[in-house]
């Protein structure tokens, strides 16, 4: 969320400076964010006004669609973007972390398998290999 900052338990809703807002271009954001991952992140970008009539920008990175995201090159020093790393967001943890153990990798592979199976079933239905019976 651009235009909001957290200080301890308090949020400050300042909004986006008019100068920055005038230069706002979602394509630039997409290009910068997708400089490192492969495949590219799918994201939602929303510019909105809040009660105080200030503008805020929300950027949400969506879960991968078909294949896990792998960083193709290192990011800025200290930013946590490491070439060939695969990140996950484990339950209960509010931040992403690199796949660090076999349990996390197994969970990731299971998620990939579920997504691929769902995709194969959708394609099979679409091309008429089988249909789902309807209740009468």
Image (tube, rainbow, N blue to C red):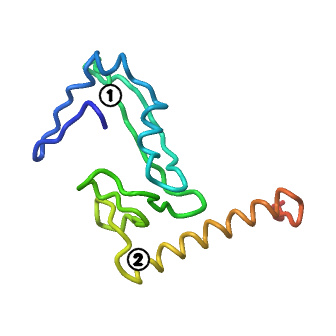
The residue pinned by badge 2 equals 104
Quarter of the picture holding the N terminus: top left
Numbered tag placed on residue 126 in the rendering: none
Which residue is rendered at x = 30% and y = 67% of the image? 92
Task: Give above or below for 51 relative to 110.
Answer: above
Which residue is rendered at x = 75% and y = 66% of the image? 121
Task: Choose top left, top right, bottom left or bottom right for residue 6.
Answer: top left
Helix, strand or loop at label 1? It is strand
Percent position (x, y) of residue 115? 61, 66
Numbered tag placed on residue 56 in the rendering: 1
Quarter of the picture holding the C terminus: bottom right
Percent position (x, y) of residue 27? 49, 31
| Left or right of 4, for residue 58 | right
Percent position (x, y) of residue 52? 25, 20
Please, which residue is most extreme toward the right here?
128
State the count of labels.
Answer: 2
Distance of label 1 from label 2 (alpha carbons): 34 Å
Helix, strand or loop at label 2? It is helix
| Left or right of 78, for residue 72 | right
Label 1 crowding class (10 Å Cα cut-off): few <14, some 14-19, many 20+?
A: many
Percent position (x, y) of residue 22? 36, 16
């Amino acid at each position: 969320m651009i235009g909001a900052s957290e200080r301890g338990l308090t949020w400050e809703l300042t909004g986006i400076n008019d100068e920055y807002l005038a230069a706002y271009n979602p394509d630039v954001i997409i290009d910068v964010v997708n400089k490192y991952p492969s495949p590219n992140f799918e994201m939602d970008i929303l510019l909105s006004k809040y009660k105080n009539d200030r503008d805020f920008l929300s950027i949400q990175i969506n879960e991968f669609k078909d294949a896990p995201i792998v960083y193709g090159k290192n990011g800025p020093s200290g930013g946590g973007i490491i070439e060939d790393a695969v990140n996950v967001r484990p339950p209960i943890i509010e931040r992403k972390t690199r796949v660090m153990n076999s349990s996390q990798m197994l969970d990731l592979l299971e998620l990939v398998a579920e997504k691929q199976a769902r995709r194969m079933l959708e394609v099979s239905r679409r091309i008429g290999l089988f249909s789902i019976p309807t209740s009468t």
